[in-house]
Image: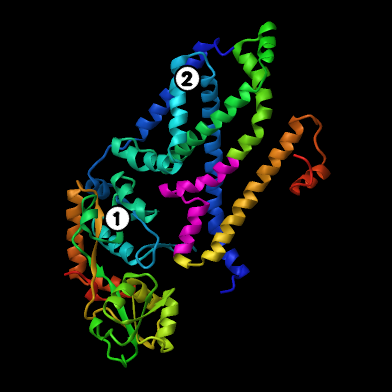
Amino acid sequence: MFGSGTVVRRSVLLGIVAGAMAAMTAGAQAADDTLSKVTASHAIVMGFYNEPPHNWVEFTGGGYKGMDYDMAAAILGKLGVTQIDQIAVDWSGLIPGLQAKRWDMLAVGMSITEERAKQVAFTTPIYQYGSALIVPKGNPKGIKGTDQFAGNKIGAILGSTDADLITAQKGDLVAFKSHPEMIAGLKAGRIDAALADETTAGYANVVSPEPDIEIMHDWQGKAARPTGFSVRLDDTAMLKALNDGIAEIKKDGTLAQILEKYGLTADNIVQ
Amino acid sequence: MQPKLSDFLLYLPTLLVGARLTILLSLATFCLAVVIALLVALGRLSRFRLLRAVLTVYVEFIRGTPGLVQIYYIFYVLPVWGLTLDAAMAGVIGLGLNYGAYLSEVFRSGIRSVPLTQREAATTIGLSYFQTLRFVILPQAFRNVLPPTVNYFLSLFKDTSLLSVITLQELTFSGMLLISTTFNSFVILTEIALIYFVMCYPIALLSTYLEYRLHRRSRRPGWRVMWLRMIPGLTRA
């Protein structure tokens, strides 16, 4: 039975194929140079990974927040951008989406690594961060860095690189499940010092300031990873414009202001 | 930490916006999948060897590769080759092609389950190919494929969460974003699961109702019967 009516069926199939092809061609992008596109439209689309204090969206309707968003907004503002659209994506989708031109720039506090630099073009390093050394107010045990780890109880998040560092330096490791628990342990005198991600520690202290602790961003033995914005490898004009903007906000104090707002310091700036 | 009812209410508006997108995506995807599946099923039952071969390759290729990879590919790789579909379009096409392949097998078996004598009878009284399909084969096949088709729809409904990898903020992704800012995973995950269930269960019930109508008992079942059927295992399926 499925033999008759061939002509009709064939034309229906052809119609669907032709329609799909037309839709696809219409959807294809043409313009390539991001800088001229951005300066002409005064708008840009960025991909972001939702993680305070780098980038996040206020779910109660407060819009985009975060230190990296603020930096990007300051620099792009100088290029005449008035509208920044952000698309939330999983961390692993950030670079593929940039390459696929789903968005034109990443400002997500991404560490500059050799592997990533093969896939995207990084700007000059903007700020760097590693771990902060947190001690009780007045630093009673005089812990200034890894040299004083041995013989002292040092807290870290379970399974973190901080925990590995403490063990390697012969410190007495006390592992915690979360940052708030660790700070509570420090205040209760269960540990003498704690190591924690600098951005997490700094921002937690902005949200709920703890007068009884000291957060040291600069300590002996600290390893920090520089971060930068990124664009597509062939987007040289955009990269240069961003680099100029970065140099500018480093010089005029905007960058230091933004870092301090989110709990980091001017020492985190990569000069 | 004791979860509070106020927490549930706090996150609900954001999650419902996501749920709305989940519904829209599932409906659009399902429509596309049904059209694809019907055409593919008919094509694979046709007498054109080349058409059959091409469609078989399509079905086997789709069934043999992960849906997540297919969606990722359409969204992130095709633009490198100059074909950029927006996120919703890429999601609906990707998932539609995927479910179209699975459903086509359901439809094919449904069509084949209609006895040959039915076709012969239709030919005898002079019905054309399309008349036979429209008035004889498909109505009977529909009855047979309804339960597995609803099954696939429910599966698809929840598989729209795969589209979170291509930036679509449907229910699951909305919840994940909330978790990454509030860290209240217990409340939010529970809430997501409940919302999915509340949306899916009526669909299952609707399918039970339709099945009841389409089979032996042609009369509309009374509400008393339907209420009883809501309790699993109480009545025979």
In reply to whether residue A80 is colored magenta, the answer given is: no
> Which labelled disc corresponds to residue B52?
2
Residue at horizontal 51 percent and vertical 58 percent from the top: B175
- Disc 2 on helix, strand or loop? helix
Where in the figure is residue B235, as x and y percent of width and height? 79, 43
The three-letter amino acid code for the residue at tag 1 is: Leu
Q: Residue A211 at what x, y percent from top left?
A: 39, 87
Name the kind of residue labelled 2 in the image.
Answer: Arg
Is residue B177 shown in magenta? yes
Q: Quadrant of residue B78?
A: top left
Dividing the picture into quadrants, the one containing residue B6 is bottom right
- Which residue is nearer to you in this view: A61 or B64? B64
Across and down, in percent, residue A188 comes to: 44, 88
Q: How many marks?
A: 2
Q: Is residue B10 left or right of residue A170?
A: right
Q: Is residue A123 left or right of residue B30?
A: left
Q: Which mark is residue A244?
A: none
Q: Chain of mark 1?
A: A
Q: Residues within 10 Å of mark 2 (few under 14, many from 20)?
A: some
Question: Where is residue A218 drawn, in percent x and y?
Answer: 24, 79
The answer to whether dots 2 and 1 both sit on one chain is no
Which quadrant does the N terminus of chain A fall into? top right
Label 2 vs label 1, nearer the camera: 2
Q: Main secondary structure of the magenta part?
A: helix
Distance between the alpha carbons at the discs numbered 2 and 1: 46 Å
Rendered position, B135 above or below B78: above
**Magenta residue span:** B153-180
Q: Classify B219 as above or below A72.
A: above
For residue A106, the mark is 1
Label 1 neighbour load within 10 Å: few <14, some 14-19, many 20+: many
Q: Which residue corresponds to the image point at 61% horizontal and 39% vertical from the top-left?
A: B151
The residue at the point 65 percent across, 19 percent down is: B137
